[in-house]
Image: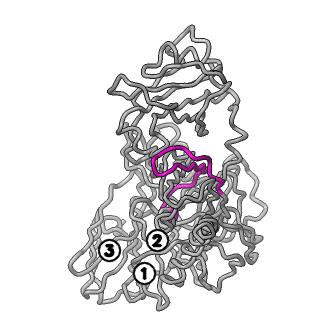
Amino acid sequence: MVGRILKIIPIVLGLLVCSALTSLAQSNAAQVRMLVSSSVYVSGDLVALHLVALDFEGKPNMEGSLINLYLVAYDGSTVSIERFNSNDQKSDQAFLLPAELRTGNYKLIAHIPGSNQQTEAIIHVYSPTIFSSTALPQNANPELGVQESKASATEEKSYWKVYENSFRIAAESQDAGMLAVKVFDPSLEGFPVRGTVRKSEIAVKNSGSFQLNTPSRDPSSRISVFFLDQGLVEEYILRDSVSIEEKLLQHQGSSSIWAYQFDNMGEAIGEVDVKISDWKSNQFSAFDNTVPFDDAVVTILDHKRKRKYIDQIYRTDFDNYEFLIQKSDQVAPDQVYFSKDYEGIATLREAFSGIISKVSVKRNKDGYELSLSPATSGFKYEKSPFILFNGSPIFDLGDLIETPFHQVYSVSVYNSFQSLKRFGVLGRFGVVSIEMKPEFEDPLGAKKDDYPYYLGINDLVQIKSEVTDPTAPDLRSVLLWTSEEIVTSDLPQTLDWKFSDVKNKHIIWADLLRSDGTSVQWSQPLPAQSAQ
């Protein structure tokens, strides 16, 4: 009887994860409220969003929900998919447009898996080729302009005050409100766009699934899931399906995945076969592809061209984002050796034998194997270290130990408690990472391409930095974009911003979503500029 139960564990785990992803959405939220920070973009631009999960009564669901965001072309085909957790406070709600998009209209469609409603908004995207061409794009209308977001009438229920470089708001009732604010020059930047809720066109149950086929069915064994592109490991006990579900639901960042199983004493069992049924593309209804191209749009696009040029020359970092995993405090390796610093080393084997501290090479009947010592001790680990060769996980270098050293960029050694912590059981006997120079072919590249790819929750965060050269122009047309600011009578919000060298008139645009699901939007010129 026990044997029969153990045989179905891997299958059950995959089904539980899949059902958990769907049930979270179905039980907590029914639709998405979406604000897009602008309507005009260039391919490769970053699109900032405000995504809020609403319950069946149209009220904000503060528990959050997983949201699939589809970028859709005019013919209804899915260009790309992003995933968001609407309650995530670590990263910004934003994504990068593909760099090679053609000039055209695109839809952003937000959908909670299992919901019968979707929220959509159209944005206008222009290829950078328009900057070097005098010809009008074939699908452009020079008499068509972008729509402005109409503001609601002022209501007595809320109080706000706009100053020259700050904004203050407090709700007079006890009901909380969620605030989004944009301060920008409308002659150089598009207005925010609010999504429209429609009946869902999602033809697939797009919740994804994650199945692990383990070499052992021991429920007390440990699974180490290694995210290759992020260089980190998540671990759980095989019988602990709740832990598996939770980690899959919360993991941020997309990555190729490799997994390995250990027994409850940390001894290696074998590689785990990972099967991922990823989030699928969907065919949506077609829509018009005529993009606005009047003088106002041309001015906005010309300003974007200037900003991109300024960023390239001065590296202002005003518009830069990075992945959360890069921004987090990851412990550096204990030792790093660069091949450019060492002449006369012929192969990796010679490097490990001669210049790399705490690592030695010993010969066995099958060839050579590495032996590593802890950073603060003289004894050696009893088994070979975990090896990352250009990011690919292996336990034995084999013939790769004879790799010409001039093809290697660096060798990193992890052999302290602090640096090995993020590798879990995989780092029990230390870790050695070998990075090849990009001009040389990766001998394990084909194998790396075959690893399953996991579409994680979007994890972009904005780089908060200042221009290092005070004389550098920044030409910022957007002085502030922020969302998810919580406002109550006990918790007013004051937002401020720094002016740029753009001398045109700026306005403040604000959106307040109340706890009962109603909302109000308004806009007005900044006081210091209203008299110009």
Q: Which image quadrant for residue 293? A: bottom right
Quarter of the image with the C terminus in it: bottom left
Residue 327 at what x, y percent from top left?
42, 47
Task: Specify the amino acid type for callout 2.
Answer: Ser
Of the residues under marks 3 and 2, which one precedes in the sequence? 2
Task: Specify the amino acid type for callout 3.
Answer: Ile
* Residue carrying label 3: 486
Q: Residue at x 28, y 76 (%)?
A: 169
Q: Which residues are magenta?
A: 248-274
Q: Name the mark nearer the viewer: 1 or 3.
A: 1
The secondary element bearing badge 1 is classed as: loop
Is disc 3 in contact with disc 2, using a CB cutoff of under 8 Å?
Answer: no
* Residue carrying label 2: 86
Q: CA distance from mark 2 to mark 1?
A: 9 Å
Is disc 2 in contact with disc 1, using a CB cutoff of under 8 Å?
Answer: yes
Q: Is residue 252 above or below residue 396?
A: below
| Magenta-span inclusion, residue 273 | yes
Work out whether residue 103 or residue 325 is closer to the camera in this orientation and state it. 325
* Residue carrying label 1: 61
Residue 257 at what x, y percent from top left?
60, 51
Q: Residue at x 47, y 57 (%)?
A: 236
Task: Specify the amino acid type for callout 1.
Answer: Asn
Residue 267 at what x, y percent from top left?
50, 44
Q: Name the mark nearer the viewer: 3 or 2.
A: 2
Is disc 1 in contact with disc 3, using a CB cutoff of under 8 Å?
Answer: no
112 relative position to 527: left or right: right
Camera sees residue 471: no
